Image (cartoon, rainbow, N blue to C red):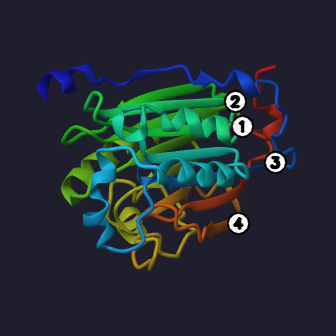
Amino acid sequence: MARWRSERVAGLCDPRINEHHVGDDNLPRDGRLRLLSFNIQVGISTERYRHYVTRSWQHLLPHTGRAGNLQKIGQLLNDFDLVALQEADGGSLRSGYVNQVEHLAHLGAFPYWYQQLNRNLGRFAQHSNGVLSRLKPHLLEDHPLPGPAGRGAILVRFGEGEDALVVVMMHLALGARTRARQLAYIRELIGGYRHQVLMGDMNTHATDLLQHSPLRDLGLIAPQVEATFPSWRPQRCLDHILLSPSLTLERVEVLSQPISDHLPVAVEIRLPDALTVDTLPVLR
């Protein structure tokens, strides 16, 4: 485990390019950006607490229903421009050796994608986060987060200078102390940017994030109030898309799509005039 941790270092990365969809011109031209965050639980459909026991084998072995669940997720993603995925598998036995981030990029016709491998268990599991984008990032950074191995954040930046939009996608720890260390790390990453979006499975409520965490001085907005977990009877709001006040919120929704044990969160924002979708590069 120590050797694995030494191999995980923060660094600049290039997004993968989905050649089948290069040149697709399906970006919104009205200055709006549609965001989605979804913990997909490696394609497992959990509908009751008892399924964590009765279907636990699906975290280790392939099963026929996973492909259908991924197909449903792919159809859902078609309506969005930038997607953060948590609990994806990077291509191991349990996923039938399918890189789920790449697979969903194809299903959703995203030109750009990136898989962040956070815990590499070889052929048995490839625990990953993912990003899917219709916009070409100016910058993409892979960051292992502080604390026990297996948690990470992906930073993507669109545009240059003071009007750049920075988006950080994450899956935070369950423990409050470790989560605070992780948020302090993320706070340092985004402190120099005016337009900020934080999205992912944060494993805590918005009040904790905005009032009692290292993010509390940023003035971030948590527009979502509906619970996301568990998907079959939502009681806790653990999945968030947080926005800086410089970004205008157009719409927020927790989607009633009980495909995973979490519900997906959708937000539509209006970009500042200096950073419209038309100014962001698309690979031609």
The CA distance from mark 1 to mark 4 is 23 Å
Q: Residue at x 32, y 65 (%)?
A: 212
Amino acid under disc 4: Arg
Mark sitting on residue 111 = 2
Q: Earlier in the sequence, mark 3 or mark 1?
A: 3
Vertical placement of 23 versus 175: above or below?
above
The CA distance from mark 2 to mark 1 is 6 Å
Q: Earlier in the sequence, mark 4 or mark 3?
A: 3
Circle 4 crowding by C-alpha within 10 Å: few under 14, some 14–19, many from 20: few
Mark sitting on residue 31 = 3
**Residue occupied by mark 1:** 109
Mark sitting on residue 171 = none
Task: Assess whether mark 4 and mark 1 are in contact (beta carbons under 8 angstroms).
Answer: no
Q: Nearer the viewer, residue 78 or 147?
A: 78
Q: Position of residue 109 (x, y in %)?
A: 71, 37
**Residue occupied by mark 4:** 251
Q: Secondary structure at mark 3?
A: loop
Circle 2 crowding by C-alpha within 10 Å: few under 14, some 14–19, many from 20: many
Q: State whether residue 268 appears in this view.
A: yes
Amino acid under disc 2: Pro
Q: Nearer the viewer, mark 2 or mark 3?
A: 2
Q: Residue at x 43, y 68 (%)?
A: 206
Residue 52 falls in image quadrant? bottom left
Q: Nearer the viewer, mark 4 or mark 2?
A: 2
